[in-house]
Structure formats: C-alpha cells, structure tokens
Image (cartoon, rainbow, N blue to C red):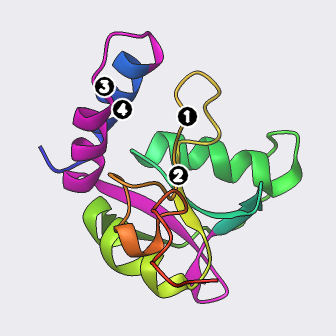
Amino acid sequence: MGDGTALAERIAERRDGSGDPMAMVGELRRALVLVPLDAGGLWTAQLGGVRWICAFTGEESLARFARARDTGDGQETGRTWEFAEVRGARLLDEIIPAMGVPAGVAVDVADPDGAMLFPPARGIVPDAVAVDAPAEEGAA
C-alpha cells in the first residue's frame, strides 16, 4: 500500500502502545503523504528548535488542517490549498538533509488523536543530520 492509510494505522497502533516504532517509521518511508505548499515550498512550522514538515495521510486530514488554518475556528474561507504528494523516504532522505537545519516530519497535525512527530533522530533521518548522532571526533 502506498497511500497514507497504512501509515495512519501504524500511528494508531503506536499511540495505543501496541505498535512497533520502527515499523511505523518504515511505513512513513513507504507512504505517499500530502504536503501543503506555501510560497512555492513545502509547508513547515517551527517548534522546539526543529523545523517540521507538515504531512498528511489523506485528503480528509489535510482538509481538517486547511480549515483550521483558514480562520482558526474551522470555518471555510474558500481558499484553495495546493499540495504535493511525496514519498516519505524522499522527505526523510533528501528534503530534510537539504534544509540545513534540524528538521522532522509532523504527520496529521490537525488530528489530536492521530498526530505523530518523526523527529530528526537516528533511525528516522540520515545520521549526518540527526540531532542525536555522536559528534565527529575533533569537532568543536
């Protein structure tokens, strides 16, 4: 399965304590997620010193995010939201390293019971950009 359905299922399993975190990361890598576009780039948010790429497992979760962002009270304004469909592996292996700052993926952030953060940690992003990777010998 390439869409975000299996990812949403793995997130639900992890949130209820029964899921395997590495299986969930693997599912993100396989999934096609929807990422809103903002000023020609991917929609991101800054929180806790990390730049988070906002990604969604389906059109319904993206629509909830869009409604919340439109007016803050869930009312529709008629704004058209453009988005890209991106493979999770591309976000983790190519886009995040190119950002040049600590970055991770925030999935389904408008769904309090279904959201999941994939931080810039080893096993999720390449070690070269993971914030928990050991410092290189001789580095300041």
In the displayed structure image, the side of residue 137 where residue 77 appears, left or right: right
Q: Is residue 33 visible?
A: yes
Badge 2 marks a residue whose secondary structure is loop
The residue wearing badge 4 is: 8
Tag 1: amino acid: Ala
* CB under 8 Å between discs 3 and 4: yes
Write down the region rendered in magenta.
15-43
Q: CA distance from mark 1 to mark 3?
A: 11 Å
The residue wearing badge 3 is: 9
Rendered location of residue 106, percent (x, y): 55, 50
Q: CA distance from mark 3 to mark 4?
A: 4 Å
The earlier-in-sequence mark between 3 and 2 is 3
In the displayed structure image, the side of residue 129 where residue 54 appears, left or right: right
Q: What residue is rendered at 52% in x and 27% in y?
A: 114
In the displayed structure image, the side of residue 116 where residue 27 appears, left or right: left
Q: CA distance from mark 2 to mark 4?
A: 17 Å
Q: Residues within 10 Å of mark 3 (few under 14, many from 20)?
A: some
Badge 3 marks a residue whose secondary structure is helix
* CB under 8 Å between discs 1 and 3: no
The residue wearing badge 2 is: 119
